[in-house]
Structure formats: C-alpha cells, structure tokens
Image (cartoon, rainbow, N blue to C red):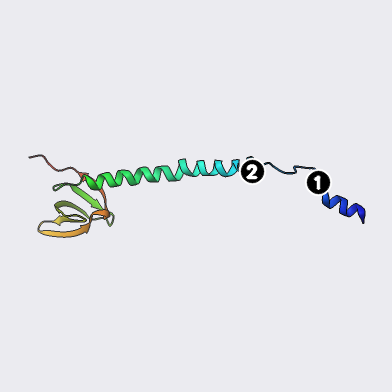
Amino acid sequence: MDFLAYAMGTGGGAGGEGGGFGAFIPLILMFAIFYFLLIRPQQKKAKQHKQLLSSLKKGDRIISSGGLHGLITGIADDVVTVEIAPKVRVKISRGSISGVTGKAQSQ
C-alpha cells in the first residue's frame, strides 16, 4: 500500500513540469502563422478595396459583386448609378462594387 502512494506522488520523473514560457511557444508560433497567412493578407485586401471605392468616378466601367457590368453615370455618398444597357440605369450600393474594368476616358 505504501508503494502505491509513493508511485502516485513522485510524478513519474519523465518530463515533469515544462516551465512557464516553454508552454507558450507553440501558441505563439500558431498565432504568428495565422497572422502572416490569414490576417495580414485579408487586411491588405480590405485596404485595397476601400481605396478602390474611394477612387471611383463618373465614367468608370465597373463590375458589381452580383456580376453586373456597367458604366458609372452618377455617384452619391453610398449609392452609385450604373448604366447597364442603353437608357437602363440601376442604383447599387458603393460597397457592392468588386472591381473596375476600365477607367474613365479623359476628355
């Protein structure tokens, strides 16, 4: 019986306590990998999209996130009027513009 109590109290001697900082190294490495592979590229893409939306002007050819291709005929604060066919204009949210396919012609 004394042998059983002694065996349970020694900790086994293999490994023991890992130390305070050594236990956090895998967690820190995982965070660094997530930051450089997921978080940082996503922030960069969001910054580029915000810059694209702020540089929109009348005459730009755009594509919306829904797939509409058109020509910008008017811009308000958060609403963009897009001509998708001759004399067919729709209003879309500025945030739903996913890209510019052609810049405005200088006249």
Instruction: Name the residue rendered at 68%, 41% in the picture.
Output: 19
Quadrant placement of the C terminus:
top left
How many numbered marks are there? 2
Three-letter code, disc 2 = Ala
CA neighbours of label 2 inside 10 A, class few (<14), some (14 to 19), many (20+): few
Mark 1 burial class by Cα count in 10 Å: few <14, some 14-19, many 20+:
few
Q: Quadrant of residue 96?
A: bottom left
Q: Nearer the viewer, residue 53 or 62?
A: 53
Residue appearing at x 87%, y 54% in the figure: 5
Q: Could you say which disc has been placed on residue 23 in the image? A: 2
Residue 22 spot, x, y in % from top left: 64, 40
Q: Viewer-proximal residue, 48 or 16?
A: 16
Q: Earlier in the sequence, mark 1 or mark 2?
A: 1
Query: Which residue is located at x 92 percent, y 56 percent?
Result: 1
Q: Is 41 on the left-hand or right-hand side of 20?
A: left
Q: Which residue is mark 1?
A: 12
Gap in Å between the C-alphas at discs 1 and 2?
19 Å
Task: Name above or below for residue 85 compared with residue 44.
Answer: below
Image location (x, y in percent) of residue 91: 18, 59
Query: Tag 1, which secondary structure?
Result: loop
- Residue 27 pos. (x, y %): 57, 44
Q: Residue furthest left?
A: 107
Which secondary structure, mark 2? loop
Q: Position of residue 7 (x, y in %)?
A: 86, 50
Q: Is residue 79 left or right of residue 4?
A: left
Which numbered circle lies on residue 82? none
